[in-house]
Image (cartoon, rainbow, N blue to C red):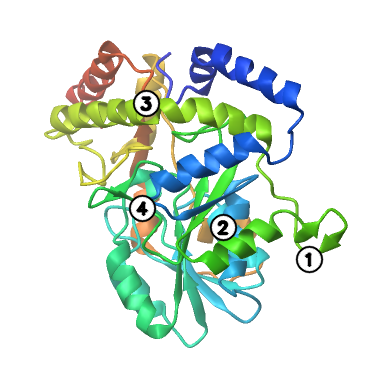
Amino acid sequence: MIKCNDVQEQARDLAEPIIARWRDVLACGEFILGDEVSRFEAWFSERCHGAFAVSMNSGTDALLLGLRALGVGPGDEVITCSNTFVATVGVIVAAGARPILADVGDDELVNAGTIAPLLSSRTKAVVPVHLRGRPAGIESIVALCRPCGVAVLEDCAQAIGTTIDGRQVGILGDAAAFSLHPLKTLGGLGDGGVLVTTNPKIAEYAESVRNHGLKSRGESAVFGMNSRLDALQAAALNIKAQYLDQWLDRRKAIAAYYDEALAETATGSDLGGFGQGNSFYHYVVRSADREGLQRYLAMRGIETAIHYPMPIHMQEAWLRSQPRIDLPNTERLAREILTIPCHHHLSDSDVERVVTTIKEFESLGLR
């Protein structure tokens, strides 16, 4: 089976150096925060061109603390998209605010044009998602929001290695949240996340609140939470970080092959196109017979996935508490999208087999 993602093989590849590093952590006894966490945060900061990087125990917490640092709370509205992982909207609700969902373009991304009609006097923040590793038009979104006093929190959960003008996304808004979930291009062996910001006050707030607001072991300056990245996770991530650029280059090479080989097919190439700065966390095609194509690929040993089959505004969690809305482009794309394998464990023959099988499906008139 050609897997759509292969976290097990990556874990096997690096098991020995990671376990060796874990032995060092066990020997020194620094299990909470400590040198491994500081080292990882320094690496992440450098990756983000010197921005502050505050690690946490999940990308969800990074989003939530980002919203709270920006003053989002009850009575506020926060604009984001519906074709994303549920956490993006869930944290807005958790902060006590009302989520307002914008439709997306054919590239599956929100943009200044889809956000602008939704801005109101109650809008406190916008959360654009760099979906699938594609860079959203963050510069135009920031230009739209700043004059209105609206904050921008970039959802970079899928966007490590995604760039705009050669610079890592996450540093143009007021803050950004990254995920270190095992499925991510840079993933731990459990949950983890990072809040990135160029604002020292936001960084100071996040650093305090993630650790119960402690000034010392016995005194808290603010009521916080427990959202510290485990030292063992940081140790594993410090090993993995050494290979990140190599993994990103392989994804881009696979995507370039797909782009050329699928250009003339009905399935077509990635919806984001081979655009500048795309890190290809997902490579997503469209098919009028998405289920038929998925079944055909599966029968021939090729795993695919649908990210995401049901937009959030159509899910039970939304309909229990929010008004029913229509997002025509989001809904249309959700019926057609299919994620095909694109990760560094694929061989050239694997990638060629994916393309050959898609073309075979179309040549048989099954589409």
Relative to 15, 256 lies left or right: left
Looking at the picture, does residue 210 appear above or below residue 234?
below
Q: How dense is the environment of label 4, judged by Cα within 10 Å: few (below 14), some, or many (20 and up)?
A: many
Looking at the picture, does residue 75 appear above or below residue 192?
below
The residue identified by callout 2 is 63
Mark 3 / mark 1, whichever is N-terminal: 1
Element at label 3: loop
Please give the name of the residue rendered at 27% of the width and 55% of the height, measured from the top-left corner. 106
Q: x, y percentage for residue 336?
A: 34, 44
Q: x, y percentage for residue 343?
A: 37, 26
Please give the name of the residue rendered at 29% of the width and 61% of the height, measured from the top-left corner. 137
The circle drawn on residue 343 is 3
Mark 1 / mark 4, whichever is N-terminal: 4
> Is the Cβ of the residue at disc 4 closer than 8 Å to that at disc 3?
no
Please give the name of the residue rendered at 33% of the width and 25% of the height, measured from the top-left corner. 246
Relative to 9, 87 lies left or right: right
Looking at the picture, does residue 179 appear above or below residue 251?
below
Disc 2 and disc 3: Cα gap in Å?
26 Å
* Residue 341 visible to the viewer: no
The circle drawn on residue 186 is none
The circle drawn on residue 223 is 1
In front here: 308 or 52?
A: 52
Mark 2 / mark 1, whichever is N-terminal: 2
